[in-house]
Image (tube, rainbow, N blue to C red):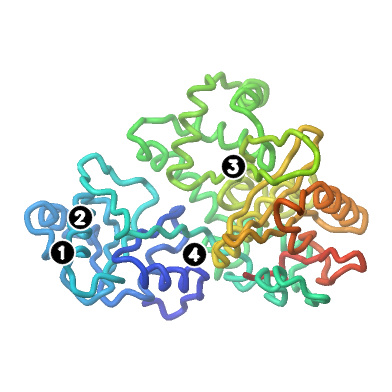
Amino acid sequence: MATNYRPRIADRLLARKLAGKGAVLVEGAKWCGKTTTAEQIAKSVLYMSETGKMEQNRQLAKINPSLLLKGEKPRLIDEWQIAPALWDSIRFDVDHAPDALGRFILTGSSVPADMSEVVHSGTGRMGWLRMRPMSLWESGDSTGEVSLENLFKTPLSIEGVSVADFGKIAFLACRGGWPLAVDMDGEIALDQAFDYIEAVEKRDISQADGINRDPSRTHRLLRSYARHQGTQASYGTIRADLVANESDDLSEDTIASYISALKKIFVIEDSEAWNPNLRSRSAIRTSDTRYFTDPSIATAVLGLGPADLINDLETFGLVFETLCVRDLRVYAEALNGKVYHFRDRNGLECDAVIHLRNGSYGLVEVKLGGDELIDAGVKTLKELSGKIDTGRMKQPSFLMVLTASGPYAYRREDGVYVVPAGCLKD
C-alpha cells in the first residue's frame, strides 16, 4: 500500500460496489491510478505481469485457475486481461463461495481484454467502476469549500475562496489529473501528459482492437479532435479539418475507427445529449459533444503550455471546459449521477447538466471568468431553465456558473451560484 496515497473519490465507490457484488472490474485511462486505488482495499494481490511469472500465471489460468484465486479476500487480480479465462473462474468462485460478496477486484491496462472465449457475462456477480484522472479536489488543488452534493439542496448562501488563480488553472489544465504528475514540479509535471500521448500513439491505440495504426496519423487526428473539443463536430467536419490543417485525407469510416479505438482505451469520453421535457417544440440536438478524459491530452497533442493558454483565451476556454467536465463527472459519480450536454436547434446550449438517479438535476455553464462572461452564462442558464416543463419533470435544483478565475464562490441575488473550479468538491 502506498504510504503517500492521496484519497480518491473512487475509494468509497469501490467499497460500496464490493459490498454488493462478488467482483468489481475497475476501468479507466492508463495512469489514472486504478491499481493503486485497488491496493488500498485489497487484502491480497496477484500481479499477473510480475517479472519472471507472467507466462507461469498465464499457464496456471488455463490448467489450475483456482490456485491463482487463493488468498485473503478481497483479492486484487492486476493485469487480469493477460488471462481473460480468469473471468469465468472468478464468476464460478463467486457463485459457489459461502461469502459471495466482495471477493475480487480486477484491474489492468486500459487496453480491452479479449473476451472471445469468455462464456459468462458476469451479470449479477460482477460490478464495474469507472475511474478517471484526479479532479482538482482529489489532487489538492481545490479547497472543497463548495460541495456539489450540498448544491442539490439549494442552499441560500455559499462561500469559498479559491487559491488557484488564472495562471495556476492554466498550469493544472496542462498538467492534468495524472496521479504521477500531481506531486511533481514545473516542466517535469507537464512532461507526463506528453509521455502519455506518445504511449497512446505508438502502442496503445493499435492494441485496442488489434488494428495496426500509424502513430503520425493518430497524432493528427488527436490534434483535430482537440480543436473540436466542446463541440458536436461530425466525422465529416473532423475530416475537413484534417484536410485543411493537417494535410491528411482519412476517410470518415477510418476516422470513426480511430475514434472508436481511442474510446476503448479511455482517451476520449464524449458527453451524451440531455433530453429534457420542454414547454416548446424546440428540436434538441442529439449528437454527442467531443471531450477528452483529461484536459492535458488536448494541450499535449496541440503542443501547448500554460503560457500558450493564457495568450489564447479561446483555446483556454475550451480546455478549461474539458477540465470542468472531468471534475463534474468524478463528483457526479459519487452522487449516483451523470454529466450530459444540452443544445437545441436554435443554438441554446448548456455546457453541463448533472442528472442524478432520483431525477434531480443542476445546470452548469463554464466560463473563464469576468463579469461579462458570468452574466452571459447566467442568461443562458435562465433561458434554458425557463423552457423546461416543470409539470412533467422537476425544476432544476441549482443553476451554476463554474469559473477559472474568481476567486470567490457566492450566490447571486438572482439565485445563481458562481463557483471557481478551485472551490468545488463532490
Residue 38 image-quadrant placement: bottom left
* Image x and y of residue 395, in percent: 75, 58
User: Taking the image as drawn, is residue 201 in sight?
Assistant: yes
Residue to which mark 3 is pinned: 301
Q: CA distance from mark 3 to mark 2?
A: 37 Å
**Left or right: 388, with 357 as reference point:** right
* Image x and y of residue 24, in percent: 34, 62
Numbered mark located on residue 180 in the image: 4
**N-terminal-most mark, 1 or 3:** 1
Contact check, label 1 and label 2, Cβ < 8 Å: yes
Contact check, label 2 and label 4, Cβ < 8 Å: no
The three-letter code of the residue at mark 3 reads Val
The residue lying at 49 percent from left, 50 percent from top is: 195
**N-terminal-most mark, 3 or 2:** 2
The residue lying at 47 percent from left, 48 percent from top is: 266
Q: CA distance from mark 4 to mark 1?
A: 29 Å
**Left or right: 130, with 141 as reference point:** left
Q: Secondary structure at mark 1?
A: helix
Query: Neighbour class for label 3 at 10 Å: few (<14), some, many (≥20)?
Result: many
**N-terminal-most mark, 4 or 3:** 4
Residue to which mark 2 is pinned: 86
**N-terminal-most mark, 2 or 4:** 2
The residue lying at 29 percent from left, 66 percent from top is: 22
Foreground: 329 or 300? 329
Contact check, label 3 and label 2, Cβ < 8 Å: no
Labels 2, 4: front one: 2
Numbered mark located on residue 68 in the image: 1
